[in-house]
Image: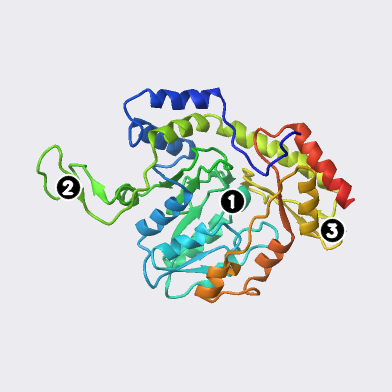
Amino acid sequence: MKQGIPYGRQYIDEEDIKSIIEVLKGDYLTTGPYVKKFEENFAHYVGVKYAVAVANGTAALHLACLAAGIGAGDEVITSPITFAASANCALYVGAKPVFADIDSQTYNIDPSQIKTKISAKTKAIIPVHYTGLPCDMKAINEIAKEKNLMVIEDACHALGARYKNTKIGDCTYSDMTVFSFHPVKHITTGEGGMITTNSKELYQKLLLLRSHGITRDEDQLKENHGGWYYEMQTLGYNYRLTDIQSALGISQLKKVDWFIQRRREIAEMYNRGLKDLPLELPFEPEGCINSYHLYVIRLKKEAKVNRKELYDYLKSKGIYSQVHYIPVHTLPYYREKLGYNWGDYPKAEEHYRNVLTLPIYPGMTDEDVKFVISKLKEVLK
């Protein structure tokens, strides 16, 4: 254990490197054939009609909100236990993020709490599949249908996860699903993201919004001056993914099932090794398959140390755990600008006070996992 054990890390092999070199030797570095191939391969993997590759997961959330028609005066309901981008995307389009508290067992957004937050201004629900465990999408979908709301799944943690015989990303229970390819995620393109949908209308909007609102598609043009002609039809962004990144994504996607299998093996080792300690371990409801982007533990009240002491102890042993997440509503911007405060979402706040993310990534060895377990036993038993 020379450099320590991080909580997450990319897995890059020679095939990945070779795929990038091939692009560098070719004619296109960006917006070439590899982008389209990556989108097609990804859509096939999750079982959806359309996929749009973008610059990162935050860009995916932003464009999904724009395509959904969310704007000024609207409200979007999401979880407070998530990265800030899940809520910030509403702010980007002039809407207000509204939080619904989490379920105490799954740590995902609680559908019963969503119902209490719906108002005449609510336009969409953004459920977050926290750690890779699917939310109760059937219940959320039923709420959305009853109230005529859009559903945008934040699946940045959940590539390869399954819910009731569906694969997360196939949009069985949603209008769109977004993914992230940051280096600690299931597959990486360095930075990158994807939006999936079964709606041709949303797909065409997303394509426009991704690239300045500009199209060269002859079927979409309002007039045509010649082969050079293009039109800006809406205000879009430069959220494109490069061919270099897409080639890496194509190569990484070939390994994704092994990546998830390995993550689940590590999670099972933790489950067995930590079961007698004063910890709450991850819960996997019937019908759900967690793809374990994160493995989170929660300290029970009888534990001899608090979360900070445990974090510091592990760090002193070269184990770099992490905390996911500081509740979004407690961040200074959300308190000072939007009026949220500590005490607003008790279950989310209790979760934050006691939760710790342990290392989990495909390149982690069995010896690494055993070492982490042994150090937790030293301090908690």
Which mark, residue 221?
2
Q: Looking at the image, do the residues carrying marks 1 and 2 touch, with CB atoms under 8 Å apart?
A: no
**Figure check: 121 above or below 241:** below
Q: State the image coordinates of residue 79 (x, y, percent, origin top left).
A: 57, 62
For disc 3, the marked residue is 305
Q: Is the residue under label 1 in contact with that under label 3 (CB below 8 Å)? A: no
Front label number (1 vs 2): 2
Which mark is first along the chain, 1 or 3? 1
Residue kind at label 1, given as amino acid type: Pro
Total numbered labels placed on residues in the image: 3
Q: Amino acid at mark 3?
A: Val
Q: Position of residue 352 (x, y in %)?
A: 69, 62
Local secondary structure at mark 3 = loop
Q: Amino acid at mark 2?
A: Leu
209 displayed left or right of 278: left
Q: Say which mark, if any, is on residue 134.
A: 1
